[in-house]
Amino acid sequence: MLRCQNLYVMARVKFRWLLPIAHACIDCMLLTALIAYTGRVFGHEKANTRRTVGIQTVLLQEGGSVEWEPKYDVSSPGPFMAIVSGNLPAGLISGLARPHAGLLRRRQSWDPTWFLLHEALALSSWYLIGIWVDRGRRRLGMIMIGFLAARFLIALTGSYDIGWRIQVFFWLGFVLWLVALSLSFVVRSGLRFTRVWVRHFGQEKP
């Protein structure tokens, strides 16, 4: 019995390190998939028309001459969205700082500045969540383990389009839970203050 408790304590303490390191490894897997995806899109000129990338030809009239300029009408790739939604708060902030990070480029398959910024924010938030779990949040720890396993399966199977939507729903639920927890704390604090005030007021009556 004591051994099981010791194992649980060891596992609980490691959450502050398990979450950041594991999610960083998954993000690196997704980054590799993003680089490979970009290489497939731009690596074969003849195959580009068969991909989901639509090439639109635009005529530009400048100075009496006509020029052909190819424009790539693309949305953010699935691996990119899986990285961003894996830690949605960090993804939103890094996306605001680097709004063009999700666009495909022929010369640069990924944005190192965006990725480093995203990982710095994500690792910090995962570390803080891990500390919170270490302080006795068993249910939250189980939920985080489940989310970690789901992200690993998404990266392993390549189910990016479905996966990033699942991750967004997870974060929406997590935020709603935090809001409910905060409201519950405010209500309980208000009731506690009211009881103390009523008790103190009652003692002051003659």
Image (tube, rainbow, N blue to C red):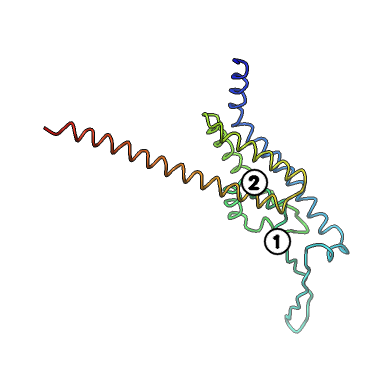
Q: Read off the residue under disc 2.
A: 86
Q: Secondary structure at mark 2?
A: helix
Does the residue at mark 2 contact the one at mark 1 (Cβ under 8 Å)?
Answer: no
Nearest the viewer among 191 and 44 is 191
Residue 206 found in image quarter = top left
Residue most extreme to the right: 46
Position of residue 4 in the picture relative to residue 32 (left or right): left
Earlier-in-chain disc, 2 versus 1: 1
Nearest the viewer among 14 and 149 is 149
Which residue is rendered at x = 56% and y = 50% of the image?
Answer: 172
Q: Which mark is residue 75?
A: 1
Q: Which mark is residue 95?
A: none
Q: Position of residue 203 (x, y in %)?
A: 18, 31
Which residue is rendered at x = 72% and y = 56% of the image?
Answer: 77
Dot 1: within a 10 Å radius of its alpha carbon, few (fewer than 14), some, or many (20 or more) residues?
few
Residue most extreme to the top: 2
Q: Amino acid at mark 1?
A: Ser
Q: Position of residue 79 (x, y in %)?
A: 72, 51
Q: Secondary structure at mark 1?
A: loop
Quadrant into which the N terminus falls: top right
Position of residue 123 in the picture relative to residue 75 (left or right): left
Which residue is rendered at x = 35% and y = 38% of the image?
Answer: 189
Measured along the vertical axis of the image, is residue 192 above or below residue 78?
Answer: above
Residue 22 found in image quarter = top right
Q: Amino acid at mark 2?
A: Gly
Q: Position of residue 177 (x, y in %)?
A: 51, 44
Q: CA distance from mark 2 to mark 1?
A: 18 Å
